[in-house]
Image (cartoon, rainbow, N blue to C red):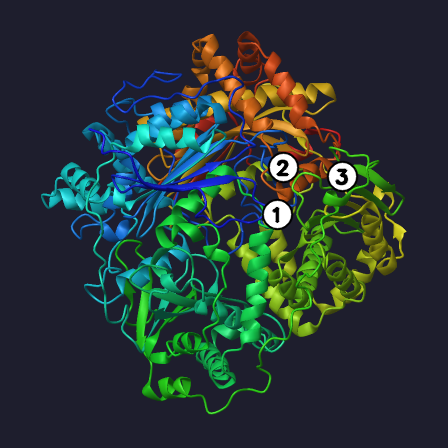
């Protein structure tokens, strides 16, 4: 029975940027649900299509009556360190975490955007009953498994897949968020299916049995994550009875243990759902191209049957500490890391978002400029990085308390100086107390926040919907957008008060390292099995920290930031009438030393610009030694540039410096006013750069650590094995680690002048820059590097191995981490090298195949067979050689079984494709075309799309439009023929490589039986295999 209509509605309450063209309506309906409706004029519903307008008691019928993808953040400790040293360029659709130049397959340029929606429910893992820990996360999984109106388990995902959409969900401590995006014209149908999550989920027993395994597989993805192990240790060692003293992820053991104790999980799930999934705890965001009136009508039709529930959820007041004071915890790390984590409990500061005292302190304690803790401790050779502040998620920002943290990366020397480093932290805290809070620093943060809000870049639609839904939980409706940018009220007394919480008595210390004393008092955290020790801190040391006798003279407050922009003039708003607009970059400079592409932004019209450069270096990739010397030189250069780069980043002018084969890639991007100033400083320092011996020692140590940590994740390891075989020039991690030890400062002093003696630069200037400004930027390079160009024949060219006709290759290795239970199979099919017009057609077939196959693959191997949490497929483009990958990761099955199930699925694809009716086939084509023609959300997305064409030396800036035209012409019988040509094992063009990583709970000797069968060619001697193989000519 419907609960009624709207009790509050306003189109004016939400404060938005003056540059935001979207319309917003905030409303509350009588069941307590709050909704933010967003009309985006760049989402176009189908011409002439009347959106459904249905009374609440009408049977709902939409365009399709035919009858999960969750993720928890498992990134390791900051930054990507997987695949380091893999100097390849490959467009891998899913592995965006590799720092090897790989890019996403989805490019988008066009006129339209997707629609999206998100629902945040104000209930998360803190609501887990103690007897069934992980229940809230399990509940999140179960809502994807069908509803009374749509009982088929994959109906929701199947509908989205057919219409260019995707979905996701995640469980946080105090809320659970569900979200999706879809082609604009199918928003209503997606909302119908989505709304039933919150009205009539089935929670079927048979689905529960399978999803219990999915929860367990998800947990196994993060079982070897040092970040997650630390988080759980902090929960496990919190004060007994505290709400944080739980196991929030949940796994098979925590939930089956509950059943063994007599807990009826289905009843508990329904109870948790019934007590918390009601209107008053729900925050809905809908972004569509329809009018606000239509969107409101849809929300009332589809969500008014959400249960009303109590009007106010009682707030739980938790007094007292989270942890016992005066202790230091030492956690054994999985990776080779040395990290010092300091945590202080603060009161909940949600209501103080206009003052942000915690951000003021984070700005100073995490600063990296001269006078900062970072600058001081780095010069001592003790630390490599410091971050500070209240993180956005988990226990750090709850209604119970905030947790202010400092995460300090230590060198080997710094690891021995933990107490000294903490002493200097308290010296800096004393400095802040003595100096008293400074309003000018707050004003600087205020100016940056206002600038970011005024000129905010758009995000992908589902990301924006999710962000707004989360914000509705913590900010009043008027500040749902502005709240995170707001530094409106300077409150010196409150800032002093928060600073007073940073005391030794309120501090928790965690040290994470592979090196710690295991001789006595070894303890175990039960859920991750992590080993740790717990020690008391002497009262004398606590007293020294409480009131340091002095503050080192090298520590002081930061100086004014010279990179904060003051000029926000937008050129596109003031163009002469005869200005010749262009849709794509044009080449404005083509000389022996430098080639420069340029495009003035006329789409986003913000005072931002992106300048990207690839610089061929002389002799940078001739041998493993030159490769290492190049990487070491660039890391030392980044280290020397850090103070400048950091100051600019505070002012939202970012810098990226990386190496790919013989090329230095430099990106400077953000607000354009001070961009030339920053670039001049970077290039001036680079020109005269010579490293110091003390920094060589530290940076070398850091590189060695990164190399030792490479391939610790099985997914990355499998990709590494594939690329190691395919790339002709590939310096192995172990070989690099061995050679790095012998390098020293004298080697660098000889090598660096040679490295910069001849260059070739190709760049792109895109955004709020006039053509003459782009030319001036090129002159900054000329001024600093008046050198000869690297001859074309001396620039590195990568060649990709051409798999032989009918190849069925296998590479088997064990996991690098001997405690890693996950096994991986990455099955790679090599298609063709790009060649002219045919390359567009090949990509169109590959992308359409992917569009159709993804959801059935996930449904069969993940949802039904429960092989593992990671089940995916995607096209690959490796140095312009196209391929296609299927990938499964599992902690339950060995790679032979996984590959057999992948093969079984692939063998059945002809029937699947043949069984598609014409309407479904056209829907998949339309969904892919919508992805290809989707409008870039922001300037950075458009720049990256253009840049990928330059890096690949393809220069086909309209490739998405061309591919969309090809997709429109594809017939089903042609796609089936394409599948049989490249994926049917009887075809000579079916050429494949299985990279298989064996988990610690599997026996790699099982592969020997398969090897002896002769059905596969095993690659035992990689070098010999590559020496005897043919390679494609290099075209990029």
* Depth check, front residue: 704 or 849: 849
Q: What whole-number distance in Å separates the C-alpha atoms at marks 2 and 3?
A: 14 Å
Q: Which mark is residue 307?
A: none
Looking at the image, residue 666 sits to the left or right of residue 135; the answer is right
Horizontal and vertical percent position of residue 876 = 59, 31
Q: Secondary structure at mark 3?
A: loop
Check disc 2 and report the residue beneath it.
Answer: 90
* Depth check, front residue: 268 or 411: 268
Circle 3 or circle 1, nearest the eye: 3
* Depth check, front residue: 169 or 453: 453
Q: Residue at x 47, y 50 (%)?
A: 481
Check disc 1 and report the residue beneath it.
Answer: 732
Horizontal and vertical percent position of residue 411 = 53, 70
Horizontal and vertical percent position of residue 159 = 40, 23
Residue 1003: in sight, yes or no?
no
Residue 234 lies in quadrant: bottom left
Q: Residues within 10 Å of mark 3 (few under 14, many from 20)?
A: some
Q: What whole-number distance in Å separates the C-alpha atoms at marks 2 and 1?
A: 17 Å
Q: Which mark is residue 797?
A: 3
Point out the tag, 2 or 3, that comes first from the N-terminus: 2
Residue 27 lies in quadrant: top left
Point out the tag, 3 or 1, that comes first from the N-terminus: 1
Image: 317 above or below 328: above
Residue 221: in sight, yes or no?
yes
């Amino acid at each position: 029975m419907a609960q009624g209509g709207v009790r509050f509605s306003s189109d004016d309450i939400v404060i938005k940027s003056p540059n935001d063209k979207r319309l917003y309506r905030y409303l509350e309906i009588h069941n307590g649900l709050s909704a933010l409706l967003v009309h985006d004029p760049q989402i176009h519903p189908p011409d002439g299509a009347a959106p459904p307008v249905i009374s609440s008691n009408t049977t709902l019928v939409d365009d399709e009556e035919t009858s999960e993808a969750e993720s928890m953040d498992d990134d390791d400790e900051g930054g990507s360190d997987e695949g380091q040293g893999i100097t390849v360029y490959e467009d891998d659709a899913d592995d965006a975490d590799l720092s090897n130049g790989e890019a996403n397959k989805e490019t988008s340029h066009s006129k339209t955007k997707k629609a999206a929606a998100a629902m945040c429910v104000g209930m998360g893992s803190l609501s887990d009953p103690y007897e069934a820990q992980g229940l809230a996360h399990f509940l999140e999984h179960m809502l994807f498994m069908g509803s009374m109106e749509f009982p088929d388990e994959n109906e929701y995902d199947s509908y989205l897949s057919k219409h260019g959409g995707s979905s996701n969900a995640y469980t946080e401590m105090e809320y659970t968020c569900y979200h999706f995006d879809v082609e604009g014209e199918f928003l209503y149908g997606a909302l119908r299916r989505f709304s039933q999550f919150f009205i009539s989920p089935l929670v079927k027993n048979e689905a529960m049995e399978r999803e219990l395994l999915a929860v367990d597989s998800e947990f196994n993805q993060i079982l070897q994550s040092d970040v997650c192990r630390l988080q759980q240790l902090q929960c496990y060692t919190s004060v007994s009875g505290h709400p944080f003293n739980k196991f929030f992820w949940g796994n098979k053991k925590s939930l089956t243990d509950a059943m063994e104790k007599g807990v009826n999980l289905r009843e508990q799930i329904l109870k948790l759902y019934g007590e918390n999934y009601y209107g008053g705890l729900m925050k809905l965001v809908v972004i569509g191209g329809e009018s606000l009136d239509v969107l409101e009508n849809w929300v009332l039709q589809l969500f008014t049957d959400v249960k009303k529930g109590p009007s106010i959820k009682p707030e739980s007041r938790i007094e007292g500490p989270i942890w016992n004071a005066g202790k230091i915890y030492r956690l054994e790390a999985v990776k080779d890391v040395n990290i010092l984590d300091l945590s202080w409990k603060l009161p909940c500061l949600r209501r103080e978002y206009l003052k942000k005292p915690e951000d003021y302190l984070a700005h100073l304690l995490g600063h990296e400029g001269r006078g900062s803790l970072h600058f001081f401790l780095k010069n001592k050779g003790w630390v490599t990085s410091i971050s500070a502040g209240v993180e956005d998620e988990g226990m750090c920002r709850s209604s119970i308390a905030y947790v202010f943290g400092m995460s300090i990366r230590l060198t080997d020397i710094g690891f021995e100086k933990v107490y000294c480093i903490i002493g200097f932290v308290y010296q800096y805290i004393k400095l802040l107390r003595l100096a008293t809070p400074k309003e000018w620093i707050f004003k600087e943060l205020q100016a940056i926040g206002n600038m970011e809000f005024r000129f905010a870049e758009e995000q992908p639609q589902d990301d924006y919907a999710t962000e707004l839904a989360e914000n509705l939980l913590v900010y009043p409706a008027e500040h749902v957008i502005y709240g995170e940018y707001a530094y409106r009220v300077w409150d010196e007394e409150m800032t002093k008060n928060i600073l007073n919480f940073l005391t030794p008595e309120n501090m928790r210390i965690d040290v994470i390292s592979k090196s710690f004393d295991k001789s006595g008092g070894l303890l175990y955290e039960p859920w991750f099995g992590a080993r740790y020790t717990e020690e008391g801190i002497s009262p004398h040391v606590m007293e020294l920290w409480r009131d340091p006798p002095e503050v080192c003279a090298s520590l002081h407050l930061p100086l004014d930031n010279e990179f904060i922009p003051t000029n926000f003039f937008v050129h596109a708003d003031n163009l002469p009438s005869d200005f010749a607009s262009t849709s794509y970059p044009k080449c404005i400079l083509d000389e022996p030393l430098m080639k420069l592409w340029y495009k003035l932004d006329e789409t986003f019209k913000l005072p931002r610009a992106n300048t990207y450069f690839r610089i061929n270096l002389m002799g940078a990739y001739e041998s493993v030694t030159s490769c290492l010397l190049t990487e070491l030189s660039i890391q030392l250069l980044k280290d020397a540039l850090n103070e400048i780069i950091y100051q600019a980043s505070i002012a939202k002018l970012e810098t990226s410096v990386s190496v790919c084969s013989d090329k230095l890639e430099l990106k400077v991007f953000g607000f354009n006013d001070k961009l030339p100033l920053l670039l001049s400083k970077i290039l001036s320092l680079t020109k005269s750069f010579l490293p110091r011996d003390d920094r060589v020692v530290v940076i070398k140590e850091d590189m060695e650590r990164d190399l030792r940590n490479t391939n610790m994740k099985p997914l990355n390891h499998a990709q590494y094995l594939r690329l190691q075989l395919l790339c002709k020039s590939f310096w192995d991690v172990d070989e690099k680690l061995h050679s790095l030890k012998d390098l020293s400062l004298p080697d660098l002093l000889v090598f660096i002048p040679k490295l910069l003696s001849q260059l070739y630069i190709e760049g792109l200037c895109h955004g709020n820059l006039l053509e003459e400004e782009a030319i001036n930027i090129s002159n900054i390079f000329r001024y600093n590097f008046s050198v000869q160009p690297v001859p074309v024949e001396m620039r590195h060219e990568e060649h990709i191995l051409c798999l032989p006709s009918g190849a069925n290759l296998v590479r088997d290795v064990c996991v690098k981490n001997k405690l890693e239970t996950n096994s991986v199979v990455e099955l790679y099919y090599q298609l063709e090298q790009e060649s002219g017009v045919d390359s567009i057609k090949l990509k169109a077939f590959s992308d359409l195949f992917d569009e159709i196959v993804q959801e059935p693959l996930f449904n069969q191997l993940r949802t039904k067979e429960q092989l593992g949490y990671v089940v995916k497929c995607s096209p690959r483009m490796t140095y312009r050689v196209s391929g296609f990958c299927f990938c499964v990761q599992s902690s339950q099955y060995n790679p032979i079984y996984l590959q057999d199930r992948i093969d079984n699925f692939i063998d059945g694809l002809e029937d699947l494709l043949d069984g598609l009716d014409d309407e479904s086939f056209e829907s998949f084509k339309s969904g892919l075309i919508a992805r290809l023609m989707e409008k870039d959300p922001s300037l950075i997305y458009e720049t990256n799309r253009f840049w990928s064409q330059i890096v690949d030396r393809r220069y086909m800036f309209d490739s998405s439009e061309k591919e969309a035209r090809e997709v429109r012409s594809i017939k089903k019988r042609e796609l089936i023929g394409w599948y049989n040509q490249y994926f049917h094992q009887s075809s000579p063009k079916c050429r494949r490589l299985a990279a298989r990583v064996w988990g610690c709970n599997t026996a790699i000797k099982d592969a020997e039986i398969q090897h002896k069968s002769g059905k596969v060619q095993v690659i035992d001697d990689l070098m010999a295999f590559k020496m005897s193989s043919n390679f494609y000519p290099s075209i990029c």
